[in-house]
Image (cartoon, grey):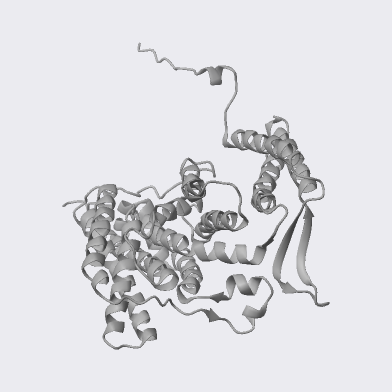
Amino acid sequence: MATMTTTVTPVERAGFKFTRQILFAVFFIAVGVWTLFGAQNVAGDVTTRLTFGFDLPDGSPALWIIPTQAYMIAVALLYVVGGAVALIPNVPKRVKFIWLIINGVLLIPTVLIVAAAGNSTNVTVMLQVSVRLATPVVLGAIAGIWCERSGVVNIAIEGMMLAGACFGFVAMTLFAAGGMDTFTAQALGVLVSVLAGGMMSALHAWLSITFKTDQVVSGTVINILAIGLTSFVRREVLLSSEAGRETLRTINIPILSDIPVLGDVLFKGRPIFYAMFILMFVTHIVLFHTRWGLRTRAVGENPRAADSLGINVIRNRWINVIIGGLVAGLAGAWFSLETNGSFDDNMTSGRGFIALAAMIFGKFTPFGAFGGGLLFGFSDALGQRFQFLGVPVPNQFLQMVPYIITIIVLAGLVGRSVAPKADGVPYEKEGK
């Protein structure tokens, strides 16, 4: 009789299981100790002034004056105690989880308050910039959700965004040079951006669905193609023409834009910014509350069972991948037409890959992806705020922050995110 041997690791022998919760607990204890020592270097009379950009009814500006040292000590103790509680075996898991979540949420204002010690910083502007910078990441994540939910891995979001940014701006430039008014030229430029993303996604669908090419390889090819193609177009067209620098106009929503803080953050934006919210709600409704969404999720989970029920798996995947490409193209337009008013080589700077991390962070749901996008947007905005406040942190380190967060997310520290079961698996109909 054959015998089966089981290898037991030292960790298992000791009865110890290293979990994400323990890792977070140790992390917060370390941050708490570091913050406690850092508080000793801050004078007791130093304060941080958080302004909000509006006046109170009595005419005084709305602001919070926070004693920096006292705040740092309080947060440090909360981190240390919270981390220690999470390490105690007999404490209910719900209590540990809630305490760690509170510590995680406090991390964001703590970094801002410590960085602005002795100065003032506008919280409303910080939030406004964070949401704006999250726009392409959220749109890219939504593009990924349409593909992944139907069972197609799409790492080509970066290339689709770059193609959208390039061809949309080129189209706008050529239309404007032909005498077309700026508004119409920009609108047509956005449309071309969307179509360019759709064309790149059609190539991805053709390779990965029809010809069953490895989907990661197909996405990589498209990313490389987009870099070379957009660089060539920029050199041949944009450098020899009078490219404009105008961006899409800001649209203030009547009444809502007058709401303090919230109005500045959410209701004073540009068209693609508003499109992000529309697409987020539309994607959620379509994928989770319509027949098409049900079929898409069925195709992503078990395409053979879906096929046996009469669902055309190949057509469903083709359509969803192209929809994702159209959304990614719109995300590309954010860079060239809504924000910079120009196009530069590789101007998306890896935001397509960060969008994939936001999608995983959000567990393949639109609202979760929005939360992931805000996280990355805040990290970008924080780097800009550090430079404005003169914080002695190397600029290169600040530029690394979004990518460091991406690595942490992809490492699974936000919890397990399960992709659809058939994600990345080519489908071939039986009998063929």
Return the x and y of residue 127 as percentages of the image width and height. 61, 63
Residue 82 visible = no
Residue depicted at 63% across the width and 75% down the height: 263
Nearer the observer, 200 or 367: 200
Return the x and y of residue 142 as percentages of the image width and height. 43, 62
Residue 29 visible = yes
| 75 to 188, vertically: above or below | above
Left or right of residue 122: residue 146: left
Number of labels in the image equals 0
| 403 to 56, vertically: above or below | above
Return the x and y of residue 421 as percentages of the image width and height. 38, 47
Task: Give the position of the N terminus as an image quadrant.
Answer: top left
Q: Quadrant of residue 355?
A: bottom left
Return the x and y of residue 79 as percentages of the image width and height. 71, 40
Left or right of residue 99: residue 224: left
Residue depicted at 68% across the width and 45% down the height: 103
**Residue projecting furthest to the top:** 1
Residue depicted at 51% across the width and 54% down the height: 362
